[in-house]
Structure formats: C-alpha cells, structure tokens
C-alpha cells in the first residue's frame, strides 16, 4: 500500500451491542472476498 494513500486514522471498530444481522451493523464490516453473498 502506498504511504500517501494509507489512512491516517481508522473509523470506530467496536459497537455497544451486536445487532445479529451484518446488514444492521454500524459501522459496516469490511471484507475482501469478491465471492461473498450478502442476504
């Protein structure tokens, strides 16, 4: 990764509760699998 494009800070990675469905999470999870199917 190019140092000029690397983020200086990251968005919050924790929540007060787990919502149960990934689509309800805020912030949304980050994944790298292009074959991932979200229901």
Image (cartoon, grey):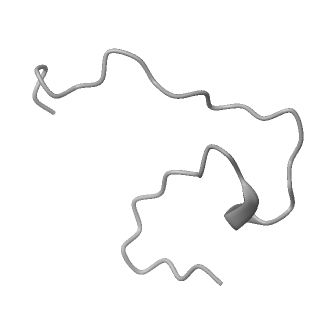
Number of marks in the rendered image: 0
Is residue 4 positioned above or below 25 on the image?
Answer: above
Q: Is residue 26 left or right of residue 4?
A: right
Q: Quadrant of the C terminus?
A: bottom right
Name of the residue lying farthest toward the top:
8
Q: What residue appears at the point 86 percent right and 32 percent down from the top-left corner?
A: 16
Q: Is residue 4 left or right of residue 16?
A: left
Is residue 15 positioned above or below 33 on the image?
Answer: above
Q: Is residue 38 left or right of residue 10?
A: right
Q: What residue appears at the point 53 percent right and 83 percent down from the top-left corner?
A: 37
Residue 22: image quadrant is: bottom right
Rendered location of residue 24, percent (x, y): 74, 60
Rendered location of residue 11, percent (x, y): 52, 28
Q: What residue appears at the point 86 percent right and 48 percent down from the top-left corner?
A: 18
Q: Quadrant of the N terminus?
A: top left
Is residue 37 positioned above or below 24 on the image?
Answer: below
Rendered location of residue 36, percent (x, y): 49, 77
Rendered location of residue 26, percent (x, y): 68, 46
């Amino acid at each position: 990764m190019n140092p000029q494009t690397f983020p200086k800070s990251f968005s919050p990675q924790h929540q007060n509760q787990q919502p149960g469905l990934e689509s309800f999470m805020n912030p949304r999870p980050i994944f790298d699998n292009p074959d991932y199917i979200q229901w």
